[in-house]
Image (cartoon, coloured by chain):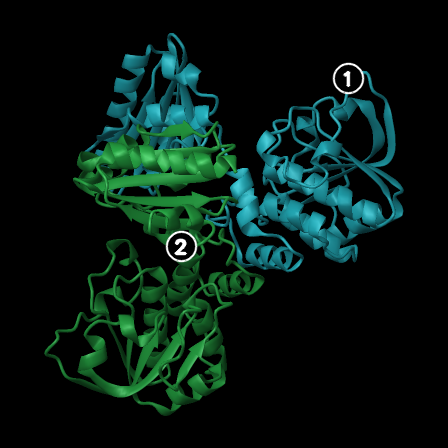
Chain colours: A cyan, B green
């Protein structure tokens, strides 16, 4: 593990920097890598982003998005530094094998144990973009509108637009600096929150299945095989029932194929990891999940019973 | 009109301060008044909040909420200062008549023309709570957790949790200071975003009426008389369709009673005020509304036709 100022020194000394992040990239992965690309170019370096996966369309508003390279397994790339952001080096797909360079790893996930010597992890940061914000200060690269848009989006998406418990004073201060550099928060949120008509339509069908149970202390959305396979994504579905007054546990049950169901739970207080563990799953106190090898109706009954029992304790 | 430091001086010189805000109070009205109440008490003053209306239940998490007084028209109250927040003095109900005191008016609405000499309006502030934040600095009253929770909620609710275009760098910096004083953003958002099961259920029924039209450039929710009267509130309904990809204009049509419908429109670009004006209504470029003296089916057809035509131009 290294200090952040050492990371700054390593980057300052490099000429050609390949930047990557985890597969199945989210707003923080794309935002952080693109922010670094813009900043390093501004500092006179050669810099490019490699991501070994499809990119989420709703992030295409970010400057530089179209320059992101999806590498082939047969590529051979050399660089001074491979900068790995928002993950340890085990989730970067083929980039790990095809790039020949010294690794610099910067991340905010507490699970990153620093396999490489040049690793900086700050688990108190809400997003990797927040660390990149600090790093650019150390490197004396001033924010411009492109860097600021990328950093702002990274922080906004990892904090549920500054609503989650991980949002700290320093997150909002960094976001404030991004606004000063010209970011328009309404445009970023309008763009990233877009959903296809099909997704909204499927959400409505899903919401028609809402059931309250455990004397109103739990609410569930129960998607049978047909509904599950209709849904392009179920992101945000559970948030629609989590907000119901009096509900402690919100649950989403999906049946991907006959005899196999996936349950996701969110709570405001009750330990849902315990409930998930009773099904052989796991997670955190407030967010947990499990797979049940049961037909839909039986899985639904089992989940409702377990949550009801847990809330009675 | 006065400067903010003069407002600070006036409050410092006063001993007994009555504080009020507009009827139909929102998060900024309640947050600003309670923040001032806590701050003035802390500064050794007698201070209390009068609101001539029912209070929204979802703000009951705020410290001091239960101390807010709903006055009677027959009350007679004397104070050194009546501090009117978040409105001009024409929207404070019976408080205007029953309180005998010198008026100090602080507001962020550009429509406030400063009827009273001691009026401070900053229309660049996203919320009155943002002005109160500055005022407390001038008065040298440090933030504590109670003041900070009230100010944070005021700013968060008036900016759609920091997503609207009115969110500025100074808003986020003030919010950052509130977090430093101990505010937990997740708790504030969880509490204020709560909805009753009935409201969520009605929203689902409403969402079942979604129609895309004008080649997917507009989306509407159309509530007939039965559905309209089932809905306790329709707040947030239109946001569910505004996010559909490709949709410029989102429209909500409600039929409160036979032969009278209310249309609300939101746009990402097109001037919906013009469309509203064609129905005898009005508003802003991006948010406008009108009342149509037509039966539901006819009103729906009329609205769809007008929006389709506007989007063709």
Q: Would you say residue A286 is visible in this rendering?
A: no
Residue A32 spot, x, y in % from top left: 67, 42
Mark 2 element type: strand
Q: Which mark is residue A105?
A: none
Vertical placement of residue B155 versus B288, above or below: below
Indicate the chain on which mark 1 is placed.
A
Is disc 2 surrounded by few (<14), some (14 to 19) or many (20+) residues within 10 Å? some
Q: Which residue is mark 1?
A: A73
User: To which quarter of the image does residue A257 belong?
Assistant: top left
Residue B281 spot, x, y in % from top left: 34, 52
Observer-nearest of A270 and A39: A39
Q: Residue at x 76, y 23 (%)?
A: A71
Residue B66 spot, x, y in % from top left: 22, 65
Q: Which residue is mark 2?
A: B283
Which tag is nearer the camera, tag 2 or tag 1? Answer: 2
Observer-nearest of B189 and A251: B189
Q: Are marks 2 and 1 on the same chain?
A: no
Q: Would you say residue A208 is visible in this rendering?
A: yes
């Amino acid at each position: 593990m290294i200090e952040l100022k050492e990371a700054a020194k390593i980057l300052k000394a490099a000429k050609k920097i390949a930047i990557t992040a985890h597969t199945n990239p989210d707003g923080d992965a794309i935002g952080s890598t693109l922010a670094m690309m813009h900043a390093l170019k501004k500092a006179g370096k050669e810099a490019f982003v490699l991501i070994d996966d499809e990119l989420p369309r709703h992030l295409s508003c970010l400057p530089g998005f179209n320059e992101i390279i999806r590498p082939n397994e047969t590529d051979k790339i050399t660089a001074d530094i491979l900068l790995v952001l928002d993950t340890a080096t085990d989730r970067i797909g083929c980039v790990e094998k095809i790039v020949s360079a010294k690794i610099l790893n910067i991340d905010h996930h507490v699970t990153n144990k620093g396999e490489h010597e040049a690793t900086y992890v700050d688990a108190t940061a809400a997003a990797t973009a927040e660390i990149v914000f600090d790093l650019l200060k150390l490197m004396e690269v001033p924010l411009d509108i492109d860097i600021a848009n990328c950093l702002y989006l990274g922080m906004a998406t990892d904090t549920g637009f500054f609503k989650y418990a991980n949002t700290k004073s320093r997150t909002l201060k960094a976001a404030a600096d991004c606004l000063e550099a010209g970011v328009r928060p309404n445009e970023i949120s309008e763009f990233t929150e877009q959903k296809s008509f099909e997704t909204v339509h499927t959400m409505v069908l899903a919401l028609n299945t809402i059931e309250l149970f455990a004397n109103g202390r739990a609410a569930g959305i129960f998607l049978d095989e047909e509904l599950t396979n209709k849904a392009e994504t179920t992101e945000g579905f559970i948030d629609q029932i989590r907000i119901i007054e009096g509900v402690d546990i919100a649950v989403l049950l999906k049946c991907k194929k006959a005899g196999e169901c996936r349950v996701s739970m969110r709570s405001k207080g009750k330990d849902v990891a315990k409930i998930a563990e009773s099904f052989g799953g796991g997670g955190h106190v407030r967010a947990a999940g499990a797979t049940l090898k049961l037909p839909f109706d039986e899985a639904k009954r089992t989940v409702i019973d377990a949550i009801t029992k847990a809330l009675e304790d």
